[in-house]
Image (cartoon, rainbow, N blue to C red):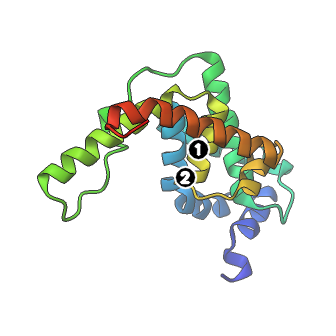
Amino acid sequence: MDEPCRDEALMAEVARGQRGALEPLIRRHVTPLLTFIQRMTGDYHRGEELFQDVFLAVWCKRHLYEYPRPFKTWLYAIAANQCRHAFRRKQLATETLMDHGALVPALGRESPVETVIASETATLVGGALALLPPQQRSVVVLRVWQQMSYAEIAQTLATGEGTVRAYMHHALATLRKHLEPRLGEPG
């Protein structure tokens, strides 16, 4: 990718007060970031509100961005902080993502039975994910759905890579403990 089109170059322009450079960043990150926030909150509509809050914070904190720091980890750090702040305020709704289909897999050529099984599995996974503490949930969502490396997650969450790996280990153990009896797998 050419330097002027890279996220870091665009964010450097934003840091200098160029509002027009923010729009391509929003467009590039809308789907993965919104998915991350919605998986963190468990609430489709609250996720949309927090997405807007994240990009408002990007604009307000633009002077704190240090080029050429990776933009993606900086962005997700802001998003994780916004989610943590929302958890602290306890303003998150209790509805699940399944109420709005956010975890339902994309329908392709699956049979109706496969579609129902995939939907039920997504509901179970979404429910189990909601049971995790926010730190563990952040690590799982960033690793599994955002495909970030452990180093990127550590940078995003401002913690050590060993801590990230420990969170992932404990989260997977909790998910396994919760899901195995429900999915009928031996435990």
Residue type at mark 1? Val
Residue 102's place in the image compared with 152, above or below, is: above
Residue 163's place in the image compared with 144, above or below, is: above
Which residue is painted at 55% across and 32% down in the image? 174
* Residue 43 visible: no
What's the CA distance linking mark 1 and mark 2?
6 Å
Mark identifier at residue 140:
1
Q: How crowded is mark 1: few (under 14 residues within 10 Å), some or many (20 or more)?
A: many
Is residue 110 toward the left or the right of residue 85 in the image?
left
**How many numbered tags mark residues here?**
2
Q: What element carries label 1?
A: helix
Residue type at mark 2? Val
Of 49 and 19, the residue lying toward us = 49
Is residue 182 toward the left or the right of residue 6 in the image?
left
Q: Residue furthest bottom?
A: 2
Of 6 and 92, the residue lying toward us = 92
Mark identifier at residue 144:
2
Which residue is painted at 63% across and 46% down in the image? 55
* Residue 3 visible: yes
Which residue is painted at 54% across and 18% down in the image? 91
The reply to whether discs 1 and 2 touch (Cβ–Cβ < 8 Å) is yes
Is residue 179 toward the left or the right of residue 21 in the image?
left
Q: Which residue lies furthest to the front in this view?
A: 186
Q: Is mark 2 on a helix, strand or loop?
A: helix
- Where's residue 101, x and y in %? 31, 41
- Quadrant in the picture for the N terminus: bottom right
- Where's residue 185, x and y in %? 36, 40
- Where's residue 76, x and y in %? 67, 48
Q: Which residue lies furthest to the left in this view?
A: 112
- Quadrant in the picture for the C terminus: top left
Image quadrant where residue 134 sits: top right
